[in-house]
Amino acid sequence: MAGRFSGKVALVTAGADGIGAATARAFAQDGAAVVLADINDALGEERAEALRAEGFRARYMHADATDEAQVAALVRHAVEHFGGLHLAANVVGDAHPDSAGPDLHTQPVEAFDHTIAMCLRTTFVCLKHEIAHMVESGGGAICNVTSLAGMIHNGFGGAGYGAGKAGVIRLTKFAAVSYADRGIRVNCIAPGVTPTRAYYKFGDEYAKILIDEQVAFQPIKRAIGTDEQAAGIVWLCSDEAAMVTGHVLPIDGGWTAQ
């Protein structure tokens, strides 16, 4: 399949749904062979099968990104099955329900730890094993997913989520500087209001209220599509962004410009 990523292999965590699924599709449409990783096996297999049915090269693999052994196996699988690893999108990240809200003094330590693990540990573990291969193979491009909550106090999300996503930004910049001379670029996007399955955990009505409240803070008064977030990830990983590394790209309808 011709495209900007023809002959390249991309790995996408949280690839079964939302921004991850949109990113996997965008990479595939631009010529990459794609490995989708997730813990939702039924949906992940369905996404991979749909891409293969359209003539794209795609595989699904179960991987809990908080588990280093599973991430190491995931990277090995991508390399062994498709012959390399050139691109990676580390999308996985979530918050424990008990870590939400403005008052950190009422939040259980266990909820904070869970959220940090989901947002920050996952990114570290993925970077560790992706970069280890890219150092040996001559380079690559990686995009992490942070959040506006890691950049500003936006009134949504809790202390753990904000701290974890701020850590993703720091990890991104650290890796970008550390590996620039070895041909590896590392960037991240910071999504604004992008309705994904996470919004609907507590029901459709609550999700609509939450989305409407958040959109009201954006200068561009609409929710952002997962495909729009994926477009940012794909561009940062492309040769068009060859001199971009350590960058945080808000795709937020102008929220952080205020």
Image (cartoon, grey):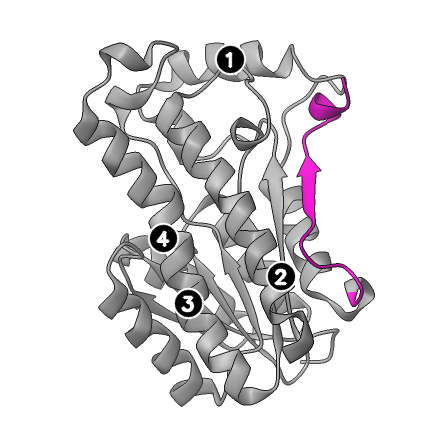
Question: Which labelled disc corresponds to residue 128?
Answer: 3
Q: Amino acid at mark 3?
A: Lys
Q: Which marked residue is nearer to the observer: mark 4 or mark 2?
A: 2
Q: CA distance from mark 3 to mark 2?
A: 13 Å
**Magenta stretch holds residue 248:** yes
Q: CA distance from mark 4 to mark 3?
A: 10 Å
Q: Residues within 10 Å of mark 4 (few under 14, many from 20)?
A: many
Q: What residue is rendered at 67% in x and 64% in y? A: 237
Q: CA distance from mark 2 to mark 1?
A: 29 Å
Whether tag 4 and tag 2 are in contact, CB under 8 A, the answer is no
Tell me which numbered mark, 3 or 1, is placed earlier along the sequence: 3
Query: Foreground residue, 68 or 204?
Result: 68
Q: What residue is rendered at 28% in x and 62% in y? A: 63
Instruction: Identify the element where label 2 is drawn.
Output: helix
Residue 223 drawn above or below residue 130 = above
Tell me which numbered mark, 4 or 3, is placed earlier along the sequence: 4
Query: Foreground residue, 34 or 243?
Result: 243
Left or right of 163 on screen, residue 73: left
Question: Residue 117: where, in percent of width, then height?
Answer: 30, 44
Left or right of 16 on screen, residue 25: right
Q: Which residues are magenta?
A: 242-258
Question: Residue 105: where, in percent of width, then height?
Answer: 27, 11
Instruction: Identify the element where label 3 is drawn.
Output: helix
Instruction: Identify the element where label 1 is drawn.
Output: loop
Tell me which numbered mark, 4 or 1, is placed earlier along the sequence: 4
Tell me which numbered mark, 4 or 2, is placed earlier along the sequence: 4
Question: Residue 126: where, in percent of width, then height?
Answer: 40, 62
Quadrant holding the N terminus: bottom right
Q: Which residue is mark 4?
A: 122
Whether tag 3 and tag 2 are in contact, CB under 8 A, the answer is no
